[in-house]
Image (cartoon, coloured by chain):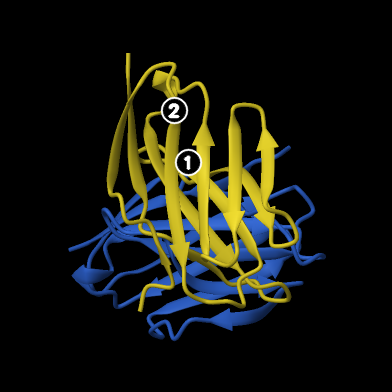
Chain colours: A yellow, B blue
Amino acid sequence: DQQVKQNSPSLSVQEGRISILNCDYTNSMFDYFLWYKKYPAEGPTFLISISSIKDKNEDGRFTVFLNKSAKHLSLHIVPSQPGDSAVYFCAASSSGTYKYIFGTGTRLKVLA
Amino acid sequence: DTEVTQTPKHLVMGMTNKKSLKCEQHMGHRAMYWYKQKAKKPPELMFVYSYEKLSINESVPSRFSPECPNSSLLNLHLHALQPEDSALYLCASSHGGSNYNEQFFGPGTRLTVL
């Protein structure tokens, strides 16, 4: 049973436009969410996180939105750059545990 | 130093071999993790060490044996593996002291079992 899902396996966006990556979760005990970026043959790189007491967190070009009632989060990248092309994973955790559940990933391609 | 290092980068082993994967971090993190990632799949948690004690074992077969010699080092001992164990093995670390911790990942070891 996949507790964290990314329903879009791939996404293509023009350079300079907005990229929106989506993530849904089923476990209402999750209260901390993270986004990671992964290039081939490398480990995931942490991008941005959000705790359940917030509904938005920004860091430069990256913004994460959390809708707790819908059990949905999204990552917005504005403006998108060709270097953003990678696989993006969302991950979820419950406070007091060290268990992080990763989503299935979305491959983002930013076209120059 | 915000780096997690892993050695070796690549490993090819037979089903009767014994080998070890190594992971090191010098960020003062007190939680360390092993993940397994197959192609086109998300990382799957295998083990978590918290303050050098094994706190999570996700029902991993005993042919994988983790070890945390000190707070900076994490090993994964491999013995009698199967071809289906071929995957990218990722090590990660996090602060461990508070509830909300991002994980820092190493580059991984690409393991091939023949």
Name the secondary structure under disc 1: strand
* Residue at the outermost top position: A112
The first of marks 2 and 1 along the sequence is 1
Estimate the x, y position of residue B39 in percent, counting from the top left: 26, 54
Q: In front: A95, or A52? A: A52
Identify the residue position indicated by label 2 in the image.
Answer: A84
Identify the residue position indicated by label 1 in the image.
Answer: A37
Estimate the x, y position of residue B110 in percent, counting from the top left: 34, 51
Residue at 35% across, 58% down: A104
Amino acid found under the numbered disc labelled 1: Lys
Relative to residue A83, is residue B96 drawn left or right? Answer: right
Q: In front: B21, or A14? A: A14
Bin the neighbour count of mark 1 within 10 Å (Cα to Cα): few under 14, some 14-19, many 20 and up: many
Q: Quadrant of the C terminus of chain B?
A: bottom left
Name the secondary structure under disc 2: helix
Estimate the x, y position of residue A80 in percent, counting from the top left: 45, 23
* Residue at the outermost front position: A69
Q: Are marks 2 and 1 in contact (CB under 8 Å)?
A: yes
Q: CA distance from mark 2 to mark 1?
A: 8 Å
Relative to residue A12, is residue B1 drawn left or right? Answer: right
The answer for which chain carries disc 1 is A
Residue at 37% across, 81% down: B63
Q: Is residue A27 above or below residue A23?
A: below
Q: Quadrant of the N terminus of chain B?
A: top right
Bin the neighbour count of mark 2 within 10 Å (Cα to Cα): few under 14, some 14-19, many 20 and up: some
